[in-house]
């Protein structure tokens, strides 16, 4: 093709090239506004109204408890949990869909080959006849739709936001799985603590039963006190057996969370319940921004906003550059001759005439989807504030409850010791000892429950703040 002719053809497309530099249609993304409190009821935490776009670094918050078993369980779950593997696969899917959207920036070029033989019949004054011909061609076709109105840009923007939302969804699920493992683990430790208490209780009651049996044999007490002692021993043993069932259920639950079979799973008993990590008096204002569910919700708003631009671009005409080249010959031997070279270059414009109602419906649907995503984002922020408030106030209340319960436990132990001494001195009946021992047992189990609840609430606080402080 002569150079001057090619230049004239290219210049005929110059208006389209200028238009291709136009900005994309549709609104630009803004994080939905929401009136937020300046601080939480506890801790003085504030929340800045900014778009949570930054990728938070993974935090191994479970190590704050300094428990090797908990650390091993959480880290195993983060590797083997099947829900996490499914979410990771969905993230890979979103990444490839983003790559698919970006591929529209490039022209579509196809290469083909043609080898055909045809025979046609014609009629004429002399009676007609037939013509047989061969055709050999190697066509190269280029088609490129100019992104004049930013349709492709908005599609890519939406795909990238959706990919980011999928990534944040995976982070949110990781946080949820780790939190569930930790809370289940502390429930297991509470069962172990109560089992230890019941083991000591059974020992105490058996010693009392032996003592009463000796007294009954010499006629110092009636059979009624001995029957009561036997009842107390059996009751404590039955309760300890019931806790064995609870322990099996919790161990199996931890096995499934860790991606393992429940059959044959075992976790060593550890009756000690540590104190939860201390909550700082002042937390940085960026804490809520690291919550992956909030970041995922914000990215879904961005994706929905970009889809409005995609729907808006459909109202405008589309401009396409079409070009083709190749060789075409009647004989295979001539296919590489210069005379066999063929080409074409041109543009086309298409605009919708009769589909305005459809396009309006599609754009209105995109706007409604954006409104719904914005409402979901605001709801996620409100829920996050509620969760932090509940965890902060719950932690403060439980701390006061533990102080009061520890005092009650000290008093119950002292009452039991005094009742045993008074019974041995013959000042009270064995029924008083039974009542004091029951009170001590109930008080000790209540203290264990509060310690376990404090640990569970501390996990809830860490989750509500997006990982750790």
Image (cartoon, rainbow, N blue to C red):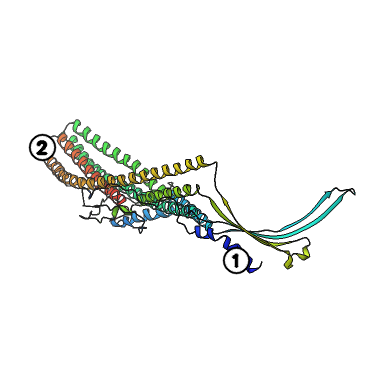
Can residue 36 be seen here?
yes
Q: Position of residue 335 (x, y in %)?
A: 74, 64
Give the numbered dot on residue 264: none
- Vertical comparison of 108 with 422: above or below: below
Image quarter in which the C terminus is found = bottom left
Q: What is the quadrant of residue 52 in the picture?
A: bottom left
In the image, 264: left or right of 447?
Answer: right
Can residue 259 be seen here?
no
State the separation of the CA atoms marked 2 and 1: 119 Å
Disc 1 crowd rating (10 Å Cα; few below 14, some 14-19, many 20+) is few
The residue drawn where x is 47% and y is 47% is: 311
Q: Secondary structure at mark 2?
A: loop
Give the numbered dot on residue 7: 1
Disc 2 crowd rating (10 Å Cα; few below 14, some 14-19, many 20+) is few
Q: Secondary structure at mark 1?
A: helix
Give the numbered dot on residue 426: 2
Residue placed furthest toward the right: 126
Q: Position of residue 399 (x, y in %)?
A: 20, 48
Image quarter in which the N terminus is found = bottom right
The disc, 2 or 1, on the residue closer to the chain's N-terminal end is: 1
The residue drawn where x is 57% and y is 52% is: 349
Q: Nearer the viewer, mark 2 or mark 1?
A: 1
């Amino acid at each position: 093709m002569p150079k001057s002719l090619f230049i004239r053809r290219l210049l005929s497309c110059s208006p389209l090239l200028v238009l291709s530099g136009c900005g994309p249609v549709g609104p630009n993304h803004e994080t939905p506004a929401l009136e937020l409190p300046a601080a939480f009821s506890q801790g003085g935490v504030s929340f800045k109204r900014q778009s949570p776009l930054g990728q938070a670094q993974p935090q191994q918050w479970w190590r704050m408890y300094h428990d090797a078993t908990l650390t091993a369980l959480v880290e195993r779950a983060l590797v083997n949990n099947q829900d996490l593997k499914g979410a990771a696969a969905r993230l890979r899917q979103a990444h490839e869909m983003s790559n698919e959207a970006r591929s529209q920036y490039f022209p579509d070029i196809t290469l083909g080959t043609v080898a055909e033989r045809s025979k046609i019949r014609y009629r004429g004054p002399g009676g007609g006849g037939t013509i047989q011909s061969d055709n050999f061609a190697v066509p190269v076709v280029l088609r490129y739709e100019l992104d004049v109105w930013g349709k492709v840009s908005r599609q890519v923007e939406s795909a990238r936001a959706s990919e980011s939302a999928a990534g944040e969804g995976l982070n949110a699920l990781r946080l949820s799985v780790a939190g569930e493992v930790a809370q289940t683990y502390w429930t297991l430790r509470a069962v172990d603590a109560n089992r230890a208490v019941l083991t000591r209780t059974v020992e105490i009651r058996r010693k009392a039963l032996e003592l009463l049996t000796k007294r009954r044999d010499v006629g110092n007490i009636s059979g009624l006190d001995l029957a009561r002692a036997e009842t107390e021993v059996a009751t404590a043993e039955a309760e300890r057996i019931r806790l064995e069932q609870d322990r099996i259920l919790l161990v199996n639950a931890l096995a499934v969370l860790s991606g393992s079979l429940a059959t044959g799973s075992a976790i060593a008993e550890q009756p000690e319940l540590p104190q939860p990590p201390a909550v700082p008096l002042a937390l940085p204002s960026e804490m809520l921004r690291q919550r992956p569910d909030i970041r995922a919700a914000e990215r879904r708003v961005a994706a929905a906003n970009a889809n409005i631009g995609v729907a808006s671009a459909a109202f405008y005409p589309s401009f396409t550059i079409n070009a083709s080249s190749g060789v075409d010959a009647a004989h295979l031997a001539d296919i590489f001759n210069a005379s066999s070279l063929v080409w074409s270059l041109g543009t086309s414009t298409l605009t919708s005439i009769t589909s305005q109602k459809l396009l309006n419906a599609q754009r209105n649907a995109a706007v409604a989807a954006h409104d719904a995503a914005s409402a979901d984002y605001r709801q996620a922020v409100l829920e996050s504030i509620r969760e932090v408030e509940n965890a902060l106030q719950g932690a403060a209340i439980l701390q006061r409850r533990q102080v009061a319960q520890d005092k009650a436990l000290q008093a119950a132990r002292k009452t039991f010791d005094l009742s045993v001494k008074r019974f041995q001195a013959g000042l009270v009946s064995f029924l008083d000892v039974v009542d004091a021992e029951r009170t001590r047992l109930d008080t000790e189990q209540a203290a264990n429950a509060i310690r376990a609840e404090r640990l569970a609430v501390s996990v809830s606080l860490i989750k509500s703040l997006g990982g750790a402080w």
